[in-house]
């Protein structure tokens, strides 16, 4: 988040939402029939510029919204550090983006509108795209407002310099100017980047997955070196596997403490219909943290895991720990054959018990805020416990940490409504509504 003055540049002619709505009504009726080749090129170029100019309008609207909400929050007596809470989520919802993207968009808008007048002018007149503006903001994020203004002046005072310059070249120019403006700030930023280290998993084709680690460079190099050395050693004594295969197997073995080919190493939770499991049905299964996997692959996983307990014994708690003789433990949650609804239990306590928490994570798959793809971190009472909300599957939603926090900002309301699947509606302080429906599960026929 960028610190910046709270007085945005005010456009001279205020945009009436009605003008934009009329434009939106008009666009689908615009016909390209009868245009010659030169006209068609002009349509393509002008439409591109118009999209950029609209991004400029969105940036000014986001900055104005932020200022209005902060002023209102302070007037309502909110502490200064909480003023403006939830603005990025409102911007994200209005733009069909995730809250994470909302942070980036509001930060970009504040920096461009308040601190980079030339970039703002290029955006507003259609010469600079929103994405390229975002990259310029990122490259100057470590500078103070005055230094950033200086880079903006040097880079974009003459907007024609953008013509023909690729995005990578533009970023390189901005980086060089930022370094010249403040070498120490750029070096400090590299040091601080260490705090962003993390590990993530994303699906790859053919039921494979990509495990990524964002690491400080020395650690990344040493991890790769350890795997390479083990591959060299085993290839040297005649191991039949390729170097790549040995490195992948060694990674799994050293992290989980188990031979990679022997078993699924930790408790994972497959969701499938009984028809898929017992009758060879083709309905795909769902593996939380990964996504949809083919029915036969799911059955192979279970066969390889071995030593399973009988269906229906998974209730959470200590009995879910793998017995010593078991190679692995796959926890199965069955979906009802007709509706695809999972079977859940309710609780009288405020805290969601382990079985119900697991149920919510399986039902919701990722954060239930519209457009948010982040993993579930909190099991939230849709109607708060203090307001009489019960600890039930119906009154629950899986949220990421950030969305759980935004929900607490003044003027936000969430409620469950009837729908084909579990459905909630978020109402923002401006009275806009956004629906969120749980994703379909294996066996879902709706
Ligand atoms: Zn979220």
Image (cartoon, rainbow, N blue to C red):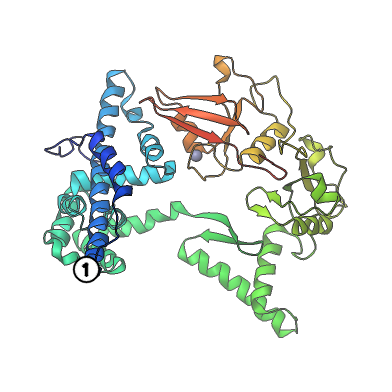
Residue at mark 1: 38
Q: Is ligand 1 within 8 Å of the beta carbon of the residue shown at mark 1?
A: no
Viewer-proximal residue among 255 and 173: 173
Instruction: Decide: is 239 above or below 295.
Output: below
Local secondary structure at mark 1:
helix
Single out the residue that lies furthest toward the front.
34
Instruction: Decide: is 85 above or below 158.
Output: above
Q: Looking at the rendering, which quadrant does residue 207 occupy?
A: bottom right
Where, quadrant-wise, is the C terminus in this rendering?
A: top right
Residue 143 visible, this orientation: no
Residue at 22% over, 70% down:
164
Q: Looking at the rendering, which quadrant does residue 36 occupy?
A: bottom left
Q: Position of residue 222 (x, y in %)?
A: 54, 69
Residue 342 visible, this orientation: yes
Where, quadrant-wise, is the N terminus in this rendering?
A: top left
Q: Position of residue 37 (x, y in %)?
A: 25, 69
Viewer-proximal residue among 201 and 236: 201
Residue at 19% over, 50% down:
124
Q: Is residue 355 left or right of residue 161?
A: right
Q: Is residue 223 left or right of residue 38?
A: right
Instruction: Decide: is 309 above or below 422.
Output: below
Q: Is residue 229 left or right of residue 11?
A: right
């Amino acid at each position: 988040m960028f610190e910046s003055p709270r007085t945005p540049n005010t456009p001279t002619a205020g945009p009436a939402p009605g003008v934009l709505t009329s434009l939106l009504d008009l666009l689908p009726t615009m016909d390209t029939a009868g245009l010659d080749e030169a006209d068609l090129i002009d349509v393509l170029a002008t439409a591109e510029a118009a999209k950029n100019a609209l991004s400029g309008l969105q940036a000014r609207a986001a900055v104005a919204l932020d200022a209005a909400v902060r002023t209102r929050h302070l007037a309502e007596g909110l502490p200064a550090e909480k003023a403006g809470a939830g603005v990025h989520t409102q911007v994200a919802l209005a733009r069909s983006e995730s809250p994470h993207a909302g942070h980036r968009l509001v930060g970009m808008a504040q920096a461009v509108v308040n601190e980079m007048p030339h970039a703002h002018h290029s955006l507003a007149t259609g010469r600079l795209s929103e994405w390229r503006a975002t990259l310029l903001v990122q490259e100057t994020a470590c500078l103070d407002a005055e230094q950033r203004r200086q880079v903006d002046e040097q880079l974009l005072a003459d907007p024609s310099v953008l013509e023909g310059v690729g995005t990578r070249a533009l970023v390189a120019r901005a980086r060089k100017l930022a370094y010249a403006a403040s070498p120490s700030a750029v070096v400090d930023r590299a040091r601080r980047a260490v705090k962003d280290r993390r590990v993530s998993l994303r699906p790859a084709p053919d039921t494979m997955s990509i495990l990524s680690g964002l690491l400080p460079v020395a650690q990344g190099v040493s991890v790769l070196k350890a795997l390479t050395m083990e591959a060299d050693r085993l290839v040297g004594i005649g191991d039949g596997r390729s170097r790549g295969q040995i490195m992948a197997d060694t990674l799994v073995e050293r992290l989980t403490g188990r031979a990679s080919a022997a078993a699924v190493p930790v408790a994972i939770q497959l969701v499938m219909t009984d028809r898929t499991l017992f009758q060879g049905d083709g309905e795909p299964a769902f593996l939380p943290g990964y996504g949809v996997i083919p029915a036969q692959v799911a059955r192979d996983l279970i066969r390889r895991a071995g030593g399973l307990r009988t269906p229906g014994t998974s209730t959470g708690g200590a009995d879910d720990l793998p017995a010593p003789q078991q190679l692995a433990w796959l926890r199965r949650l069955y979906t009802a054959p007709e509706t695809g609804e999972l079977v859940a239990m309710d609780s009288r306590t405020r805290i969601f018990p382990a079985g119900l928490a697991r149920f919510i994570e399986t039902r919701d798959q990722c954060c239930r805020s519209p457009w948010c793809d982040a993993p579930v971190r909190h099991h939230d009472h849709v109607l708060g416990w203090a307001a009489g909300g019960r600890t039930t599957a119906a009154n629950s939603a899986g949220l990421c940490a950030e969305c759980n926090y935004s929900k607490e900002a003044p003027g936000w309301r969430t409620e469950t409504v009837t729908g084909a699947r579990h459905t909630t509606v978020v109402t923002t302080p401006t009275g806009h509504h956004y629906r969120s429906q749980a994703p379909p599960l294996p066996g879902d026929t709706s």
